[in-house]
Amino acid sequence: MYSEKVMDHFNNPRNVGELENPSGVGTVGNAKCGDIMRIYLDIDNLGVIQDAKFKTFGCGAAVATSSMATELVKGKTVQEALTVTNKTVMEALDGLPPVKVHCSLLAEEAIHAALWDYAKKHGIEITGLKPPVSDVDEREELLFRHPPK
Ligand code: FES
């Protein structure tokens, strides 16, 4: 049901963790399944993404898509990072079952939310970037500070 690449990124997720003093952070959630994803970006003064990390409280596909999304945005400019959509992430993972497509959407939204945060903090505009669509509430924020054991 899952491709080898999905299983690989689920079993050995890349870029798990957080960044100290990130240039941008994006946290998004899906109200239906309750999964939450946070992505941290380190962006240099030329607007190139030097590092990306993630934390995901969610399903295996959410872990695999965050892992792949962080891999794909590294080395890209903030403008180029916008081309990393859920479709790109799914293709890079050799596909996802239809019921798991929304998990890849969460990865796209988390990247966009982190870029939005970066743009806001630096007073810049990223052409085509829209405000985050699904920001999580305070209760969910607490999960990141006190993750379930
Ligand atoms: Fe919701 Fe995967 S089931 S993100």
Image (cartoon, rainbow, N blue to C red):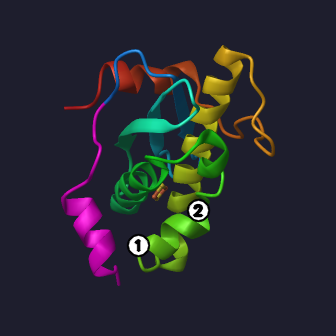
**Badge number at residue 93:** 1
Considering only vertical position in the picture, is 57 above or below 60?
Answer: above
- Secondary structure of the residue carrying numbered label 2: helix
Q: Quadrant of the C terminus?
A: top left
Q: Which residue is painted at 33% across and 60% down in the image?
A: 60
The residue beneath circle 2 is 86
Q: Which residue is painted at 58% across and 52% down in the image?
A: 108
Q: Is residue 74 left or right of residue 30?
A: left
**Badge number at residue 102:** none
Q: Is residue 122 left or right of residue 38?
A: right
- Residue type pointed to by label 1: Leu
In magenta, the rendered stretch is 1-17
Q: Quadrant of residue 148?
A: top left
Considering only vertical position in the picture, is 11 above or below 80?
Answer: below
Q: Quadrant of residue 129?
A: top right
Q: Quadrant of the N terminus?
A: bottom left
**Residue 43 percent across, percent down from the top left:** 50, 29
The answer for how far apart the CA atoms under marks 1 and 2 are is: 11 Å
- Secondary structure of the residue carrying numbered label 1: loop
**Residue 143 percent across, percent down from the top left:** 38, 26
* Outermost bottom residue: 1
- Residue type pointed to by label 2: Asn
Q: Which residue is painted at 63% across and 51% down in the image?
A: 80
